[in-house]
Image (cartoon, rainbow, N blue to C red):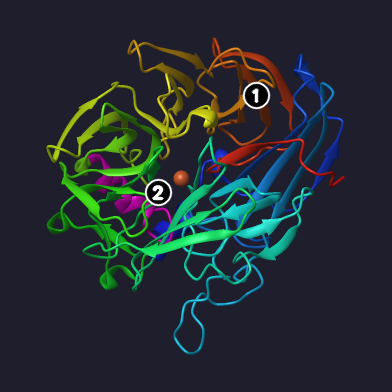
């Protein structure tokens, strides 16, 4: 791409970084915030450094946006960069050629486990942050973690264990890890895969890990790209199941039609089979979108890149060694979520958002799926509003799986203003909206962290 093209391009308002860190108190609320919501909603996403220009919306230092809710009030909004090694100016590669796992931008997700709040990215160590969003530092669990950590770990609702993995461009290519409920790294094992792939997510059921080994491989020829992974038809595509409660259990692989998956909705075991629901990109949809997303700067575009993905189900039968698959819906969606109390177990409801594919001009909506009936209901945001991932927050004493709320940041397309929306998860209708003091750029993933320790 020529320099003139780069200079002409400006990201649309809702993708533009904010220039600074601010704090605001006693935020205006429309509607009624449920008084039992006592905690913090925190969301992560890339944000260019001060004084630099945003050229891309998928790379850059992580910035956390947090809103503190208590007693029916929105006490504060705060945004803070996650100060990893690269934020402080360090290179990802040390002079001796080794990769510095404390350097990458922790810009993808933020979770809470064993009294730690962790900002995550899949190519580095987690970074611990304080309840006031200030950076504590890199976390290797007492020196036990020697690989990167995925941004999509899975907490088992029965044991409290946190299952995760790390992938790398060099061996070990894939390593499975498990933290116990107290935050101690109790198990790590290498998993054999044919090559270095970009593995953004995985699934965990009551007894199994489900691996997604898909044809996006690390390629030296792409090192000038922001993300040096590309489509590799020859690699093939396969799902693997591995007992996580049996040390050194073998992985049983199932070849599938080529596709790409960023995000898993859920998986569960049923009658000896493993059922996986995830958001699937066809090769054509994915490769056209990736050609834009993997560049170091966004090109000027005559039309939005395609990249429409759909909720899809694979059913794996370990006894027969067979896999069947079919689409669950024809809406273009991303960012699937669920009541995390059903993670790895049969879940009737999944949630997702529409209209969030790169530079889409489609209306955004929050969608609630009923996987038992195939029905879906949605809440549209209108033509001028972008929506982010909708996080499910259970009621304290829930009467059912969908008894709770959904939280998501909605931002005007021109980037001028944002609100934290709180919707009743039962009917996907808004019950309250918190006016944020600035436009919050679209980002990636967030969490509701209930009753976190006081941090101001
Ligand atoms: Fe993700």
Left of 77 or right of it: where is 8?
left
Left of 427 or right of it: where is 170?
left
Q: Is residue 292 magenta?
A: yes
Magenta segment, which residues?
Answer: 285-300
- Residue annotated with mark 2: 245
Residue 13 in view here: no
Tell which of 364 and 101 is nearer to you: 101
**Where does residue 310 sit, x and y in percent of width and height?**
31, 29
Mark 1 or 2, closer to the camera: 2
**Where does residue 367 sit, x and y in percent of width and height?**
45, 20
Please report contact status of discs 1 and 2: CB closer than 8 Å, yes or no.
no
Q: Quadrant of residue 231?
A: bottom left
Q: Is residue 155 magenta?
A: no
- Residue annotated with mark 1: 421
The N terminus lies in which quarter of the figure?
bottom left
Q: Quadrant of residue 23?
A: top right
Task: Give the spatial CA distance, label 1 vs label 2.
Answer: 39 Å
Tell which of 145 and 309 is nearer to you: 145
Say which residue appears at 38% left-offset and 67% top-offset: 168
Q: Is residue 273 above or below residue 347?
A: below
Tell which of 438 and 423 is nearer to you: 423
Determine whether the beta carbon of the residue marked 1 sits less than 8 angstroms from the nearest atom of ligand 1.
no
Looking at the rendered structure, the number of numbered marks drawn on it comes to: 2
Residue 447 in view here: yes
The C terminus lies in which quarter of the figure?
top right
Say which residue appears at 46% left-offset and 18% top-offset: 368
């Amino acid at each position: 791409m020529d320099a003139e093209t780069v200079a002409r391009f400006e990201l649309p308002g809702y993708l533009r970084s904010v220039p600074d860190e601010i704090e605001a108190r006693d935020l205006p609320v429309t509607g009624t915030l449920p008084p039992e919501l006592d905690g913090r909603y925190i969301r992560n996403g890339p944000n260019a450094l001060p004084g630099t220009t945003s050229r891309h919306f998928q790379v850059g230092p992580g910035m956390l946006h947090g809103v503190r809710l208590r007693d029916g009030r929105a006490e504060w909004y705060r945004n803070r960069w996650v100060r990893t090694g690269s934020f402080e100016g360090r290179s990802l590669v040390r002079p001796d050629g080794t990769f510095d796992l404390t350097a990458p931008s922790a810009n993808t997700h933020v979770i809470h486990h064993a009294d730690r709040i962790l900002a995550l990215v899949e190519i580095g160590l987690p970074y611990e942050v304080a309840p006031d969003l200030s950076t504590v530092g890199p976390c290797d669990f007492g020196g036990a973690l020697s690989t990167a950590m995925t941004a999509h770990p899975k907490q088992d609702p029965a044991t409290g264990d946190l299952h995760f993995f790390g992938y790398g461009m060099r061996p070990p290519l894939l390593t499975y890890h498990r933290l116990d409920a107290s935050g101690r790294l109790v198990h790590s094992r290498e998993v054999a895969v044919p090559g270095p792939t970009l593995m953004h997510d995985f699934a965990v059921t009551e007894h199994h890990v489900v691996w997604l080994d898909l044809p996006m491989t690390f390629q030296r020829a792409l090192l000038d790209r922001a993300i040096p992974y590309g489509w590799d038809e020859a690699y093939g595509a396969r799902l693997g199941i591995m007992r996580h409660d049996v040390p050194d259990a073998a992985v049983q692989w199932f070849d599938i039609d080529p596709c790409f998956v960023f995000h898993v909705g859920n998986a569960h075991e049923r009658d000896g089979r493993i059922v996986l629901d995830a958001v699937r990109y066809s090769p054509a949809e994915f490769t056209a979108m990736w050609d834009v997303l993997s560049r170091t700067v966004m090109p000027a575009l005559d039309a939005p890149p395609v990249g429409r993905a759909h909720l899809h189900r694979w059913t794996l039968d370990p006894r027969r060694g067979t896999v069947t698959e079919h689409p669950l819906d024809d809406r273009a969606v991303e960012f699937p979520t669920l009541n995390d109390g059903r993670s790895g177990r049969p879940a009737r409801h999944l949630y997702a958002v529409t209209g969030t594919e790169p530079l889409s001009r489609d209306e955004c909506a929050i969608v609630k799926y009923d996987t038992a009936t195939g029905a879906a209901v949605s809440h549209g945001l209108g033509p001028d509003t972008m929506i982010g991932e909708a996080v499910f927050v259970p009621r304290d004493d829930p009467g059912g799986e969908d008894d709770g709320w959904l939280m998501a940041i909605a931002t005007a397309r021109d980037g001028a203003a944002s609100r934290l929306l709180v919707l009743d998860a039962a009917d996907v209708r808004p019950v309250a909206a918190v006016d944020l003091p600035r436009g919050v750029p679209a980002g990636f993933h967030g969490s509701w962290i209930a009753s976190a320790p006081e941090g101001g």
